[in-house]
Amino acid sequence: MTTDQKPAPQQEAKDPDSRKSPASPRRRWVRTLGIGLLAIAVAGSGGYLWLDASSDVHNAGQNECVNVTPTGQASPGDRDAVCGVLESLIDAWDRNDAVAYGSQFTEDATYATYVGSYYEGRADIVNSHKALFGGFLEGSKLANSYLGIRFLSPDTAVVTGRGDDYTGDAPDELSKVQTYTLIREADDRWRVAAFQNTQRKSVMERISFILSPDTRPEAEK
């Protein structure tokens, strides 16, 4: 080799883009997964809205408690007395008066909320509602409908219904199912001895009725 000979230069790439490597299998898999999850989310949200919209309540109950025909051992006037207690509860709530609300319960009453809070005794019920009416339920009102009144004995009645608290316009559909157990006390007044409040899960209920039709209540068929 002579001194004026130079080593051959390395061959340059003909196309600058040829230096770019193709998309890796991992990147393609992530992209495909993302598109699939997005499609599932869109389909799922549409399905949820359909389930919610198609979950109607046929047995909405009576707007007035006194329009319910009671069953069991009821003497004349007992239904009206029991309904009077429930109307007093609504009136006290609408005024956000925790003391008046609690006065409709027995001294040892139990009170279970839809979020799972469990109160024992009138004082506990009054104190909790003072806090609620002074906080996020301030200015709220109650909407109720009544499904049934059963007198288990001359001095014990169970009232089932639907209800909701609201501000502004009353809701078209009540989202909670409620049970009141009332007793006639020694002073001949009826009071609530136990209250249970359950949030209705319309979509879960609809799914249950689709997958297992026999779970649908007779009144909802």
Image: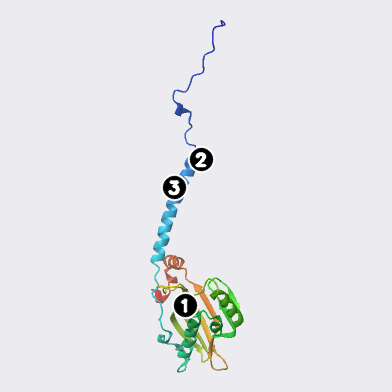
Q: Which mark is residue 142?
A: 1
Q: Earlier in the sequence, mark 3 or mark 2?
A: 2
- Please report contact status of discs 3 and 2: CB closer than 8 Å, yes or no: no
Residue 1 image-quadrant placement: top right
* Image x and y of residue 54, in percent: 38, 66
Which amino acid lies under the numbered mark 1 shown in the image of this protein? Leu
Nearer the observer: mark 1 or 2; the answer is: 1
Q: Name above or below for residue 132 compared with residue 88.
A: above
Residue 4 image-quadrant placement: top right
Q: Which mark is residue 26?
A: 2
* Image x and y of residue 203, in percent: 44, 65
Question: Which residue, as the protein is rendered here, is positioned at the far top?
Answer: 2
Q: Name above or below for residue 159 compared with residue 3.
A: below
Element marked by disc 1: strand
Element marked by disc 3: helix
Element marked by disc 2: helix
Is residue 121 visible in the rendered image? The answer is no
Q: Which mark is residue 179?
A: none
Which quarter of the rendering shows the C terminus?
Answer: bottom left
Is residue 39 visible in the rendered image? The answer is yes
Nearer the observer: mark 1 or 3; the answer is: 1
**What distance separates the C-alpha of mark 3 from that of mark 2?**
14 Å
Q: Residue at x 53, y 77 (%)?
A: 196
Which amino acid lies under the numbered mark 3 shown in the image of this protein? Ile
Which amino acid lies under the numbered mark 2 shown in the image of this protein? Arg
* Image x and y of residue 56, in percent: 39, 70
| Residue designated by label 3 | 35
**What distance separates the C-alpha of mark 1 from that of mark 2?**
56 Å
